[in-house]
Image (spheres, helix red, strand yellow):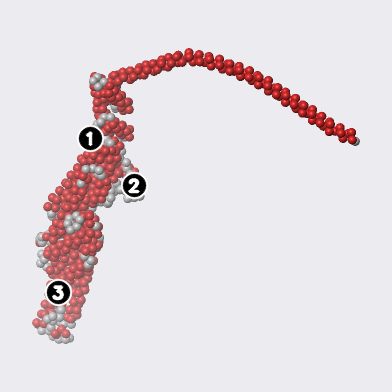
Amino acid sequence: MGITSRMIPTEDASARKRAIEEKLKQEQETLSFIRDNLEKSDQLTKGMVSILSSFESRLMQLENSIIPVHKQTENLQRLQENVDKTMSCMDHVISYYHVAKDTDRIIREGPTGRLDEYLACIAKIQKAVEYFQDNNPDSPELNTVKARFEKGKELLEAEFRSLLTRYSKPVPPILILDAISVDEELEVQEEVVLEHLPEAVLQDIICIAGWLVEYGRNQDFMNVYFQIRSNQLDRSIKGLKDHFRKNSASSGVLYSPAVQTKRKDTPTKKAPKRPGYDHDLRVKHHSDALTEKHGATTGKDDVLDIEIDSYIHCISAFVKLAQSEYTLLTEIIPEHHQKKTFDSLIQEALDNLMLEGDNIVSAARRAIMRHDYSAVLTIFPILRHLKMSKSEFDATLQGTAASTKNKLPTLITSMETIGAKALEEFADSIKNDPDKEYNMPKDGTVHELTSNAILFLQQLLDFHETAGAMLASQETSSSSSSYTSEFNKRLLSTYICKVLGNLQLNLLSKSKVYEDSALSAIFLHNNYNYILKSLEKSELIQLVTVTQKKAESSYKELIEQQIQMYQRSWYKVTEHLTDRNMPNAIYHQGAKLKDKERQVIKDKFKGFNDGLEELCKTQKGWAIPDKDQRDFIRQAQKKVVSHAYQTFLKRCANISFTKNTEKYHKYRPEDVEEMIEKLFDTSA
C-alpha cells in the first residue's frame, strides 16, 4: 500500500513533463516556421523594392518621352478646333450674304397659307440686318436685307389686313336676336357666343399682331384693326335694323328664325322678349286717340312702332356686340393700347345710335310744337330701356374717353327734358282746350278730351318709374342724387292729379256750352263716371291717392251732384202733379167743380203729358254709356215720376172734370215707366 501511493505522483509528474516538452517542441517548430516566413518575406520585399525602383525608373523615362508628345497633340487639337470654329463662323457669315437670295422666293410669294415658314424667313433676314449693322454698317448687303425685311413686314401687314377683311363678317341678325333675347320660361339662360373669326384665322392674326408689335415696331395695324372691325360692328347693327323692319313689316311681329327652327311643329311662334322688359310697347293702341286734332295715320303709327322697337333692339345689340368685340380685341391688341383702340372701334356705331336717338328727340320736339303730345309716348319705352341698360353700357365703355362715356347720359338727359316738357304742355293743353260748340258731343257722352287724357295717363302708368324720374330730373330744389323712388312716385301722383284737376275745370267750362242744363249734367256725369271707372280699373287710382287720399269719394260726390242736377229737369213734369193750385173740391166726394177748377185739372194733365212727351223725346237721344249708371238713373226717375203720377191719378179718380177723359188721361203709370225706360237709348 505504501509503495503504490508513492508511485502515483511520480507517474503524474512524468506525464506533465512529457506534455510540456511536447508543447515546447510545437512552439519551437512554430517559431522556426515564422522565422522561415520572415526570411522569405524579407526576400520578397527586397525583390518588390527592386522591381518598383526599376518601374519608377522606367516610368520617369516614359514620362520624359510622352509629355512633349502630349503637348504637341494638345496644340494640334486646339489648332483643329480653331480651324473648325473659323470655318463655322465663315459659313455663318457667308450665310448672311446669301439670306436675301435664299428668302427671295418665299418673301415674294407672301405669308398666305404658310405663316410659320414665312416668319422663320423674316427671322433670318432680321438676324442678317443685325449682323451687318454691328459688323459692316457700310456694306451694300445691309441695304439689301433691310429692304427685304421692310418688304416682308409690309406683306405681313397686308396679310393682317387681308385676313381681317376676308373673314370679318357682320353678325347675322338672328344670332344677335338670340344673344339679346330673354326667355322667361328658362330658369338658366343659355349664353349665345358670338364668334367673329374662325379659330385658325384668329391664331394667325394674333401671331402677326404679336410679331408686328415685337419686331415690326409698328402700330399702324391697330388702326387697320379698328377700322375693319368698326365697319363690321356698324354693319351688324344696320343688318339687325333692316332684318327687324322687314320682318315687322311683313308679319307685324319679329321672330328669330333660330328660335323657329327649334319648334317647327308649333304653328304660332312666340316673339323673343326684349331684354329687361315686356316686348309689347302698346303705344299704337293709344296714338290714334291722342292725335285727334292732327290726323296721324295708322300707317305712320305702324312705322313709328317698328322704329321704336328696332332702336331698342339695336341699343341692346350694341352693348352685346361691343362686349364681344372687346373680348376679341384683348387677344390681338397689346394691353396698353386696348382701351384706345376699343374707343375708336365703337365710335361709328355708337355715333349712329346716338344720332338716331337725337333724331327721335327732334321728332318728338317738332310734334310737341304741333301740340301732338302723343309723341312723348315714343320717348318713354326708349328712355326706360336706355336707363335700364345704362349700368351695362357704362361697364362696357369703362376706360374709354370721357366724351364717349358721356354720349348716353347726354341722350338720356335730352329725352328726359323733352319728355318733361311734353308732360307739362300736355297738362296745360288739357286745361286750355277751347270750348267749341261743334266739338261737343250732341248726346252728352264722354268728351274726346276726357278719353284722350285718361288714355295718356294710363300710358304713363305703364312707364310710371320712367315718368316719375323724368319729372324729377327737372326739379331744381335738390340734387338728382337725392331722388328716390318714393319721391318720383309723389311727383308723378301730383302731375296726374294736376291733369285730372285741369280736365275737371275744362269739362265744367265745356258743359256750359249746352243750353239744356240737364244735358250739361248728363255730360258731366258721363265724364266724371268715365274718369272714376278708368282710375279704378287701372292702378291709376293708387297713384292718385298718394297725394289725394279722398279722390275716389270726391268723384262719387261729383257724380251724385250731376245726377241730382239732371233730376231737376223732371220738375217741370212732376210739378203738374202736385197739389199746388188744385181746387179744394177734389177733397170732397161728390162736389161739383166749377169750369175754372175743371180747367186747372185739364191744364195739369196736359202739362204733364206734354212735358213727359217732350222730355222723353229729347232725352231718348242722350247717352249714358255706363249700363249700371243708366239703369240706376232710369229706376230712380221711374220711381219718382211713377209715384207722383199714381198719387195724382188717385186724387182725380172720382172727379168728373171732362167728358173726354182719354184726351187728358193719355198714359197709364205703366206707360210712363215704359217711356222712361227708353231714355238714353238711341236705338229705341
| Residue type at the position of mark 1 | Asn
Q: Which residue is mark 1?
A: 223
- Which quadrant holds residue 583? bottom left
Q: Residue furthest right?
A: 1
Residue at disc 1, secondary structure: helix
Q: Which residue is mark 3?
A: 571
Characterize the local packing of mark 1: few (<14), some (14-19) or many (20 or more) Cα atoms within 10 angstroms: few
What whole-number distance in Å separates the C-alpha atoms at marks 3 and 1? 89 Å
Tell me: residue 607, above or below residue 167.
below
Residue projecting furthest to the left = 596
- Name the residue tied to disc 2: 189
Q: Position of residue 252 (x, y in %)?
A: 24, 47
Along the horizontal axis of the image, is 210 left or right of 377?
right
Q: Is residue 404 left or right of residue 593?
A: right
- Foreground: disc 2 or disc 1: 1
Who's the residue at 79% across and 30% down the image?
16
Amino acid type, callout 3 = Tyr
Nearest the eye: 442 or 514 = 514
